[in-house]
Amino acid sequence: MRLVLATVGVSFLPLLASAHHAFSANYDVNEKGSIEGVVEEVFWANPHVHFYVRVTNQDGSNELWDAEDSNLTSMSRRGWNRNTISVGDKIRISGSMGRDGRRRIWAAEVFWADGSPVR
């Protein structure tokens, strides 16, 4: 019975490993940029916190961007909590841009509309 359970358990390891993608699979470390807009949604949960930001382009069109940050433990160590950034807040985010033109950014730095850092 132990052998059967061990075999079944080991068979799930590839699924677990593929569940968490490498940073470089989602972001281009050589392409840095920033976005600025209004927070539409906050996803405050593991494995990573996400801020969905509505960005208005120069031509007046809007795009929804996914700004990804660290896990809950890392965020709380930095002094952040689920109320640090809220829906309706205007923020600017700088970091690595999404691969293949995807509207996502790794939130290396986050600033309020007045330019002060979010802490």
Image (spheres, rainbow, N blue to C red):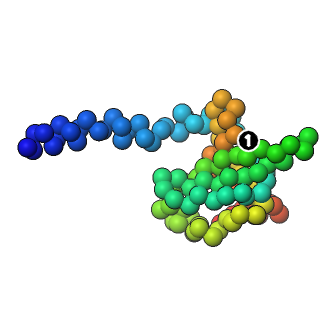
Spot occupied by residue 117 in the image (x, y as percentages of width and height)? 72, 62
Spot occupied by residue 24 in the image (x, y as percentages of width and height)? 54, 34
The structure residue drawn at horizontal position 48% and vertical position 52%, both measured from the top left corner, is 47
The image quadrant where one finds the C terminus is bottom right
Front in this rendered view, residue 101 or 27: 101
Q: Can the viewer see residue 8?
A: yes
Quadrant position of residue 96: top right
Q: Is residue 55 above or below residue 77?
A: above
The structure residue drawn at horizontal position 66% and vertical position 44%, both measured from the top left corner, is 105
- Give the total number of marks visible in the rendering: 1
Circle 1 residue: 33
* Side of 99 where 4 appears, left or right: left
Spot occupied by residue 44 in the image (x, y as percentages of width and height)? 56, 61
The image quadrant where one finds the N terminus is top left
The structure residue drawn at horizontal position 76% and vertical position 51%, both measured from the top left corner, is 54
* Side of 30 where 74 appears, left or right: left
Q: Can the viewer see residue 108?
A: no
Front in this rendered view, residue 63 or 25: 63
Q: Is residue 33 above or below residue 41?
A: above
Q: What's the residue type where badge 1 is placed?
A: Gly
* Residue that sits furthest to the right in the current view: 59
Q: Secondary structure at mark 1?
A: strand
The structure residue drawn at horizontal position 69% and vertical position 40%, both measured from the top left corner, is 103
* Residue that sits furthest to the top in the current view: 100
Q: Is residue 35 above or below residue 10?
A: below
